[in-house]
Image (tube, rainbow, N blue to C red):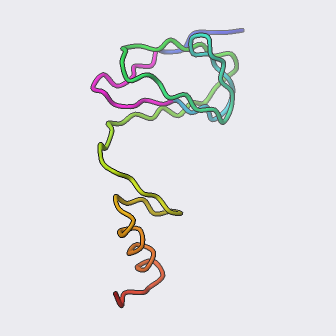
Amino acid sequence: MHRPCPNVSPSTCGGTTALFVLGGSLRIGAHAMGAAELAVLEREGTLVAAEIAEDASVLLLSGEPLNEPIVGHGPFVMNRREEIVQAIRDFYGDVSS
């Protein structure tokens, strides 16, 4: 049995909103989603109607864009490659530079 769930309100200030299904299944509009699936919602809009198909646990993520470069390497996330290199040196204890 499908049942409606509370509406999700994407960010109205130009941010990004995403839903990650941890377990169960649901439907957003015409799109069915199951466990371990991610939906990134449009930045424009006010409400998203979702319908639960099977008891679902959902992680709701929302945030404003950084509008700056991002560089990632392993567990490190910085703005420039040089910062990544320094973070790796610091992590491994090489503070000679």
* Quadrant housing residue 43: top left
Query: Which residue is depicted at the point 65% across and 23% down?
Result: 33
Magenta stretch, main secondary structure, is loop
| In the depicted structure, whether residue 33 falls above or below residue 38 | above
Spot the residue most to the bottom.
96
| In the depicted structure, whether residue 68 falls above or below residue 40 | below
In this orientation, which residue lies closer to the viewer: 54 or 68? Answer: 68
* Quadrant housing residue 53: top right
Residue 25 location, x and y as percent?
68, 23
Residue 20 location, x and y as percent?
56, 33
| In the depicted structure, whether residue 94 falls above or below residue 14 | below
In this orientation, which residue lies closer to the viewer: 32 or 26? Answer: 32
- Which image quarter holds the N terminus? top right
- Is 96 a magenta residue? no
Magenta region, residue range: 7-18
Query: Which residue is depicted at the point 34% across and 31% down?
Result: 15
Query: Which residue is depicted at the point 59% across and 13% down?
Result: 51
Query: Which residue is depicted at the point 61% across and 10% down?
Result: 30
* Quadrant housing residue 88: bottom left
In this orientation, which residue lies closer to the viewer: 72 or 37? Answer: 72
Residue 30 placement, left or right of 42: right
Residue 47 placement, left or right of 51: left
Residue 10 location, x and y as percent?
39, 22
Spot the residue most to the left.
13
Residue 85 placement, left or right of 19: left
Residue 46 location, x and y as percent?
36, 14
